[in-house]
Image: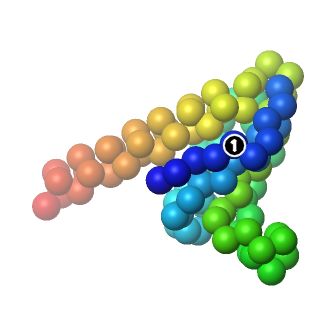
Amino acid sequence: MELRVIEKTDEELRMEIADEDHTFMNVLKGALLETAGVVAATYDMNPEQSGGQTEPILSIKTDDDTDPLDAVGDASRRVQDLADDFVTAFDAAA
């Protein structure tokens, strides 16, 4: 996975996340929307409507007290924790 920050301010972030699809992007977006300080989170994968871009672009907006990169880190850790919990529950059920 390759990440490239396209634009960053104190309250907004646009980041390209190479080689990912809707499956991962929806999970990350959902985790971001549950993260304290995140006002909005979305992603775009449609090259026809986005000037020809082919990799997903994550866009987030945070409140004044939350750095958008910190919010992505928090959301990513939450996704990892959920995946770990699922593996544990699956192994216990098998």
Q: Residue lying furthest left in this view?
A: 94
| Residue 33 visible within the image | no
Q: Answer above or below: position of 64 versus 87.
A: above
Q: Answer above or below: position of 11 versus 48.
A: above
Foreground residue, 74 or 19? 19
Q: Quadrant of residue 57?
A: bottom right
Q: Answer above or below: position of 44 versus 64.
A: below
Pinpoint residue 8: horizontal percent, then vertical percent.
79, 36
Q: Is residue 78 left or right of residue 84?
A: right
Q: Is residue 94 left or right of residue 78?
A: left
Where is the C terminus found, in terms of image quarters?
bottom left
Pinpoint residue 81: horizontal percent, then vertical percent.
40, 39
Pinpoint residue 6: horizontal percent, then vertical percent.
75, 46
Q: Count the marks: how many? A: 1
Amino acid at dot 1: Val
Foreground residue, 94 or 78? 78
- What residue sits 69% from the left and 43% below the top? 5
- What residue sits 84% from the left and 31% below the top? 9
Q: Residue lying furthest bottom in this view?
A: 48
| Residue 24 visible within the image | yes
- What residue sits 73% from the left and 69% below the top? 53
Q: Which residue is mark 1?
A: 5
Mark 1, secondary structure of its residue: strand
Near mark 1 (Cα within 10 A), the count class, few <14, some 14-19 or many ≥20, is: few
Foreground residue, 3 or 30? 3
Pinpoint residue 46: horizontal percent, then vertical percent.
74, 75
Q: Residue lying furthest top in this view?
A: 65
